[in-house]
Each structure stands twice: as structure tokens, then as C-alpha cells.
Image: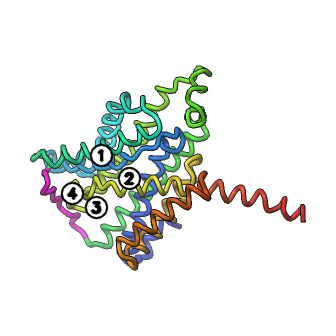
């Protein structure tokens, strides 16, 4: 039903909004591969998204390769960068890893702004698709729907696979996992590389969608914080959590951006983040499961 929605020609604004929901599903699900399954809280996920944006833009500008095709090498390059920085960064744990990944975003942002062939601080303009806005939005809608589905499918497969069990062991106690002869270093690198591929692909296509690429847009640290909040809100221990969190918080974010001033929106998000940590530390999915499991017992006891 979601896939055939453009057939009914809803308003272009509605398609754009659902497109953004798909984007956050991709980012939150991919982040969860390292942040939720492994427990390594990363605030640098938006960097891989931005790397995908600029890689695809350069391929389009200099080689004439359409971003719909260039998105794949953009994802591969983002994964390559993750593999390079993963070895030193994943040696750190807890807040140290979080701070390093946050600094990585600022470093990439500064590098891009100081390289003229990447557009520098002026950004890059890309040509729009030679078609009507309704058809254009419908095409991007379908592509991102497929990519969101693929990302969720991979996350679900990882969770139910031996790979996912190893990541869960790292999350629970990495030292114990090592004593059980689990190759924690290799598993972490694989999870980190895989989690960066999908943002790179999404960024490669998103570059064509926005048509104007600027570091302040694609390396916005608020996106990283929002991704983390979405995954934690839904629950990082399952593939379903980030999906629910991305959908719910995308709707809340859209409502706040339309009817609430930005300053108050940040306060509301901060309060929401605190509420999730205090009352639902395992996410809304686990919270609802516990609530559903306790209800029959309460009825029986009554």
C-alpha cells in the first residue's frame, strides 16, 4: 500500500514528507547496526551520509554519472572511509568513542569547506530532473522506499544471524565476549562498515533530490543527534525499534517545525530524550512488550 501511494497523486508536499521519513528510517536502521546492536554510541553517522552526497555529486559533475547510479560507489566509498577510521576509533569505548565520532563530523565538514574542487563553502549546484515536480517526487519516493525496505531487511537479517548474536554479546559485555573466543574487533569493524554503506547510498541519491549541496546542510550535527534519538526511542536492541522511532519522531519533528519556534522545539526534543532514557531505557518496543506481558498477569491476579 505504501509503495503504490504515488499512483493516487497525493500533494507533492505529502510525498516529500514521506520521503524524509524513509530517509530517517535508512539512517536510524543503519546506525543501529553499530549503535544499537553493538552498543557503540556514534554521533558521527551523518558524516557518512555527507560523504555519500559529495561522492555522488563529484561523479555527476566530472564524469556525468547520474546519482541514481553513482549512489552505489558513494556507499562503497563511505564504507571505505569507515573501514579506515574504524580500526583506531573502535579501540575506544563509551563516551570516548562518542566524542571521537562527533569530532569526525567536524573534521570532514572543515575539510570539505576548504577544498575548492568540492565547492568549498559556496556549495555545489546540480541540475534538476527534466520533468514535473510530481513525477520527480514520485521517483525519489519509490527509490527511497526500496532503500528503506532493504536497510530494514538487512538489519532484521543481521539481528537473527550469528553475526547479530556476536554483536549482542559485545553490547552486553565485550570482555566476556572475548573470553568466549568471539572475534570482537572483526565484528565491530564489519558492523561499522555495513552501517556506513546505506547512509552513503542514501546521501548519493539525496544530492540529486536537493540539487544544491552545502556542508552546512549535509554535515548537520543535529541530524546525527536526531538519528540517535530515533533509534533509542524505538529501541536499539531490535531492528523494529529504529523503524518505529524514525516514523514517530519524523511526524513529531514535522509538527514542531510547522507550529513551534525552533528554540522551543529543541527544548521539547531535550525533554523527550530525557523521558526516553528515564522511563523507557530499552525503547518503546521493549516497553510495550513488557506492558503487554504484565497486563494478563495483573488481570489474573485481580
Residue that badge 3 annotates? 209
The one of 135 and 300 positioned closer to us in this rendering: 300
Magenta span dominant secondary structure: loop
In the image, the segment drawn in magenta is: 119-131
The one of 11 and 92 positioned closer to us in this rendering: 92
For image coordinates 19% across by 46% down, the residue present is 110
Residue that badge 4 annotates? 213
For image coordinates 56% across by 59% down, the residue present is 276
Q: CA distance from mark 2 to mark 4?
A: 18 Å
Q: CA distance from mark 2 to mark 1?
A: 9 Å
| N-term-proximal mark, 3 vs 1 | 1
| N-term-proximal mark, 2 vs 1 | 1
Crowdedness of circle 1 by 10 Å Cα count: few (<14), some, many (20+)?
Answer: many
For image coordinates 77% across by 56% down, the residue present is 293
Q: Are marks 3 and 2 in contact (CB under 8 Å)?
A: no
Q: CA distance from mark 3 to mark 2?
A: 20 Å
Q: Are marks 2 and 1 in contact (CB under 8 Å)?
A: yes
Question: Residue 14: x percent and y percent?
Answer: 40, 74
Amino acid at each position: 500500500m505504501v509503495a503504490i501511494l504515488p499512483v493516487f497523486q497525493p500533494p507533492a508536499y505529502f510525498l516529500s514528507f514521506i520521503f524524509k521519513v524513509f530517509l530517517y528510517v535508512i539512517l536510524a536502521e543503519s546506525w543501529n547496526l553499530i549503535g544499537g546492536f553493538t552498543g557503540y554510541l556514534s554521533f558521527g553517522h551523518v558524516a557518512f551520509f555527507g560523504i555519500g552526497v559529495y561522492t555522488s555529486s563529484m561523479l555527476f559533475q566530472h564524469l556525468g554519472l547520474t546519482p541514481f547510479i553513482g549512489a552505489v560507489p558513494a556507499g562503497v566509498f563511505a564504507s571505505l572511509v569507515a573501514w579506515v577510521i574504524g580500526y583506531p576509533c573502535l579501540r575506544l569505548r563509551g563516551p570516548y568513542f562518542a566524542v571521537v565520532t562527533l569530532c569526525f563530523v567536524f573534521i570532514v565538514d572543515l575539510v570539505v569547506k576548504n577544498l575548492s574542487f568540492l565547492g568549498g563553502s559556496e556549495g555545489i549546484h546540480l541540475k534538476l530532473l527534466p520533468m514535473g515536480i510530481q513525477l520527480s517526487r514520485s521517483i525519489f519516493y519509490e527509490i527511497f522506499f526500496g532503500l528503506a525496505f532493504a536497510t530494514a531487511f538487512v538489519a532484521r537479517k543481521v539481528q537473527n544471524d550469528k553475526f547479530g548474536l556476536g554483536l549482542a554479546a559485545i553490547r552486553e559485555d565485550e570482555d566476556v565476549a572475548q573470553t568466549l573466543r568471539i572475534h570482537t574487533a572483526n565484528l565491530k569493524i564489519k558492523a561499522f562498515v555495513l552501517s556506513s554503506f546505506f547512509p552513503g547510498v542514501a546521501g548519493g541519491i539525496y544530492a540529486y533530490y536537493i540539487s544544491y549541496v552545502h556542508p552546512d546542510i549535509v554535515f548537520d550535527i543535529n541530524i546525527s543527534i536526531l538519528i540517535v534519538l530515533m533509534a533509542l526511542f524505538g529501541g536499539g536492541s531490535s531492528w523494529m525499534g529504529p523503524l518505529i522511532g524514525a516514523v514517530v519522531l519524523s511526524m513529531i519533528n514535522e509538527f514542531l517545525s510547522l507550529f513551534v519556534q525552533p528554540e522551543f522545539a529543541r527544548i521539547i526534543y531535550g525533554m523527550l530524550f530525557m523521558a526516553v532514557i528515564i522511563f523507557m531505557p530499552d525503547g518503546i518496543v521493549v516497553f510495550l512488550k513488557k506492558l503487554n506481558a504484565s497486563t494478563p498477569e495483573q488481570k489474573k491476579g485481580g
